[in-house]
Image (spheres, rainbow, N blue to C red):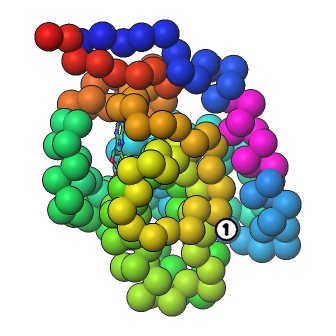
Amino acid sequence: MVIGKPLLTVEQVQNRVKELASKISEDYEGKQVLAVGILRGAFMFFSDIVRHIQVPMSIDFLIASSYIKTQTSGEIKIHADLREDIKGKHVLLIEDIVDTGLTLKHIQDTLLGRNPASLKICTFLDKKPRRKAELKLDYVGFEISDYFVVGYGLDYDNKFRNLPYISIFKEST
Ligand code: IMP
Ligand code: MG
């Protein structure tokens, strides 16, 4: 397997995280946010962005998966649900990457059924060319082409999540 040079450097990642956080802080001024990290991929983005968001906040996590290696299985599972009751709360979903959008669509539909006051989506990466589900993304870090990327929480076979930057992943043959 080959990890190329960064597609997004540590500096680009961190600058964009701060920009997103300040937009979120503006938009939610006067409100209390429930930030929901979608594990495992969003763990690094989540922990970076929340420390720059300037409004009162509580946090929660859910664990979902749809991917086996680099193939989308199309079947979404919620392995661990939220602990918070989200009724009447301003929920901000924090995701690593939206690819087909099927995972987030499933999560969004499930959570909307619990009557939050609002539900918005913040994703670090948007792989728009591969979208299958119709989904409004409120905050997007970067749009990328159809590459398989790793780092900054994103994995191949649960590896490379700890890289502090985003790289394109290629399987060597
Ligand atoms: P979707 O349901 O197709 O939008 O897939 C979303 C999930 O697939 C993401 O939360 C990631 O965990 C995973 N995923 C999608 N594209 C990539 C990628 O390029 N690298 C690593 N994981 C990815
Ligand atoms: Mg994910």
Q: Which residues are magenta?
A: 14-22
Q: Which residue corresponds to mark 1?
A: 33
Above-or-below relation of 31 to 15:
below
Residue in the image at 34% along x and 71% along y: 106
Q: Main secondary structure of the magenta part?
A: helix
The answer to whether residue 129 is magenta is: no
Residue in the image at 22% along x and 49% along y: 72
The answer to whether residue 15 is magenta is: yes
Q: Residue 123's x, y, as percent?
A: 55, 51
Q: Residue 26's x, y, as percent?
A: 85, 60
Q: Secondary structure at mark 1?
A: strand
Q: Amino acid at mark 1?
A: Val
Instruction: Please say whether residue 42 is visible from this viewpoint.
Output: yes
Above-or-below relation of 70 to 96:
above
Pick the front one: 95 or 59: 95
Above-or-below relation of 105 to 147:
below
Q: Left or right: 76 with respect to 173?
A: right
Instruction: Please say whether residue 62 is visible from this viewpoint.
Output: no
Q: Left or right: 36 with respect to 34?
A: left
